[in-house]
Image: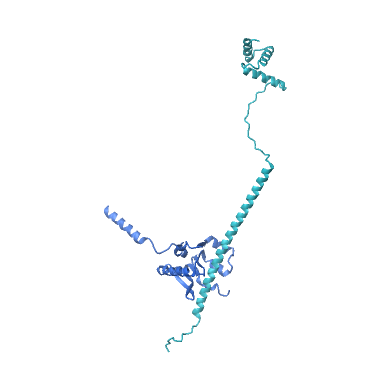
């Protein structure tokens, strides 16, 4: 009996030590859920989610202002956005905190960052499954607000997003 | 008539053995002895017969008493009808307005979400285009740049 108990203890210890993934987030969790919940006490902190049904209905009823946007939104299943009041100094702090988090993350990659006078104006992050982008994140720093948009899908084409502003 | 004789006549009456003359005697005696508390059941019985004969019924009809059923009052006062109609109309109007407001709020939320999504996509698109343009533009070398030649 004793060897069996010892084997069970070893298996249990192994499961607790290595079996639970600590870094990989669940598929349903978004960038907003992972990195912005800590700011939920801030004024006018509001998260809104366009669920799959609402995105689908918007696509089917032609509610997007431009066919190019409709084309992109057909690749999107869920759209989630967060906004909260944030003065420039606080936004700088949030971006620094985000940069520190991104250094530890293997899930999200910084795709593009644009700055104005040395201050970050916006960052695009991507989350991929192989070569397919499954989440496209836009962190936009405003004068008084911070807006985070998260587009979830199976395969979001970034080139379609880039071409959106071309010829408009 | 003495009480003993009355007792005998009443006994005969309840056995249906009395004659009409004897019944008249009983009736007359009992009607005169109204104040007397004895024979109250017999008095009531003969009084009832007298009442029926006075209203034109020759025979006594026995009926089973039925419990009164409660009936719905249909004739409401006018003020109550006006109040009920006012409450009904107000309630329906409030429900309609409330539903409309909720619907409008929902539509506004959806429109705001769509607008935010579009603005965010446009913001990313502009940024990515600027990045591509900068990458493709030839940049001037600074004066102190070291070249191979």
The answer to whether residue B10 is seen in the rendering is yes
Instruction: From the top left corner, tell me how far across and down residue A62 is, in percent.
Output: 59, 65
In which quarter of the view is residue A103 placed?
Answer: bottom left
Residue A121 left/right relative to B52: left
Shade of chain B as shown in the rendered figure: cyan
Q: Residue furthest bottom?
A: B149
Q: Residue at x 33, y 60 (%)?
A: A14
Scheme of colours in the image: by chain
Q: Which chain is blue?
A: A
What residue is drawn where x is 67% and y is 15%? B32
Which corner quadrant holds the C terminus of chain A?
Answer: bottom right
Left or right side of A54 for A39: left
How far from the left and from the top, in percent, is residue B66?
63, 29
Give coordinates of residue A117: x percent, y percent.
49, 76
Examine the rendered structure and indicate whether residue A116 appears above or below residue B37: below
Between A11 and A16, the one lying in front of the other is: A16
Residues A99 and B22: in front is A99
Q: Is residue A161 visible?
A: no
B146 to A165, vertically: above or below: below
In percent of the image, x 29 and y 54: which residue is there? Answer: A5
Where is residue B116 drawn, in percent x and y?
Answer: 54, 66
Q: Nearer the viewer, residue A64 or A85?
A: A85
The total number of labels drawn is 0
């Amino acid at each position: 009996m004793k060897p069996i108990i010892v084997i069970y203890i070893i298996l249990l210890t192994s499961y607790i030590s290595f079996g639970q993934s600590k870094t990989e987030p669940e598929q349903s969790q978004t960038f907003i859920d992972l990195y912005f919940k800590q700011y939920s006490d801030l004024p006018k902190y509001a998260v809104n989610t366009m669920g799959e049904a609402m995105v689908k209905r918007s696509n089917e009823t032609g509610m997007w202002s431009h066919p190019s946007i409709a084309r992109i939104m057909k690749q999107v299943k869920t759209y989630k956005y967060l906004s909260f009041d944030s003065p420039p100094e606080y936004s700088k702090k949030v971006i620094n905190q985000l940069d520190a988090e991104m250094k530890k993350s293997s899930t999200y990659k910084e795709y593009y960052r644009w700055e104005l006078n040395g201050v970050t104006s916006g960052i695009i992050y991507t989350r991929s499954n192989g070569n397919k982008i499954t989440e496209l994140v836009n962190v936009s720093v405003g004068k008084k607000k911070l807006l985070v948009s998260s587009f979830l899908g199976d395969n979001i084409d970034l080139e379609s997003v880039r071409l959106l502003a071309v010829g408009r | 008539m003495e009480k003993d004789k009355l007792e005998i006549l009443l006994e005969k009456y309840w056995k249906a053995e009395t004659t009409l003359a004897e019944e008249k005697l009983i009736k007359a005696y009992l009607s005169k002895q109204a104040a007397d508390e004895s024979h109250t059941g017999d008095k009531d019985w003969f009084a009832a017969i007298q009442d029926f004969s006075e209203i034109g019924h020759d025979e006594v009809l026995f009926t089973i008493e039925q419990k009164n059923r409660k009936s719905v009052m249909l004739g409401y006062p006018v003020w109550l009808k006006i109040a009920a109609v006012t409450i009904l109309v107000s309630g329906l109007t409030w429900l309609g307005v409330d539903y409309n407001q909720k619907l409008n709020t929902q539509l506004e939320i959806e429109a705001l979400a769509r607008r935010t999504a579009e603005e965010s996509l446009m913001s990313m698109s502009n940024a990515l285009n600027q990045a591509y343009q900068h990458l493709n533009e030839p940049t001037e070398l600074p004066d102190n740049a070291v070249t191979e030649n």
